[in-house]
Amino acid sequence: QVQLVESGGGLVQAGGSLRLSCVASGSTSSINRMGWFRQASGKQRESVAVLSTSGVVTDVTNSMRGRLGISRDKATNTLYLQMSRLNAEDTGVYYCAASTGRGAQPYEFWGQGTQVTVSS
């Protein structure tokens, strides 16, 4: 089992920046990839960005290309999401997820989510 705890969400003005953190604990050696997902009110959850343990970034949402950075501190098992030039469409609940699989295999572990609200 893997436990994920997100932090760093909050209220930010349009044009601002925010960094989200996700600390993983438990059987972290089994993780093959970790990622950030978000869900806006009334919309389906979407991938924001995914980072494999080999350092490959995939599944970056088009709306945030050039505005985000995803990284992982292996020493502390922490995944980061740095977001800049935020706009109202970035508002939503951001979830951290971890997977032991690849490709289309589902993410087995999810955090509780952290709310990001961008005021215009």
Image (tube, rainbow, N blue to C red):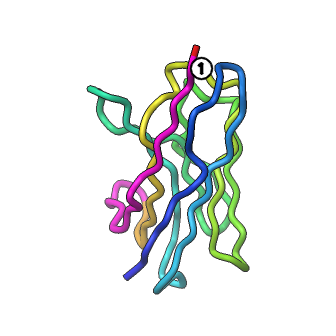
Q: Is residue 104 magenta?
A: yes
**Residue that mark 1 sits on:** 87
Q: Residue furthest front?
A: 11
User: Badge 1 local density, few (<14 within 10 Å), some, or many (20+)?
Assistant: some
Camera-nearest residue between 101 and 117: 117
Along the horizontal axis of the image, is 107 left or right of 68?
left
* Residue sitting at x 51%, y 71%: 32
Camera-nearest residue between 62 and 6: 6
Instruction: Please say if 55 is above or below 13.
Output: below
Which portion, as a residue range, is magenta? 103-119
Residue 49 falls in image quadrant: top right
The percent coordinates of residue 66 (x first, y second) are 72, 29
Instruction: Please say if 65 is above or below 53.
Output: above
* Residue sitting at x 72%, y 69%: 73
Image quarter (top left, top right, bottom left or bottom right) of the N terminus: bottom left
* Residue sitting at x 70%, y 30%: 67
Camera-nearest residue between 118 and 111: 118
* Residue sitting at x 62%, y 57%: 21
Q: Residue furthest left?
A: 42
> What amino acid type is highlighted by mark number 1?
Asn
Q: Is residue 17 magenta?
A: no
For numbered disc 1, what is the local secondary structure? Answer: loop
Instruction: Please say if 20 is above or below 120.
Output: below
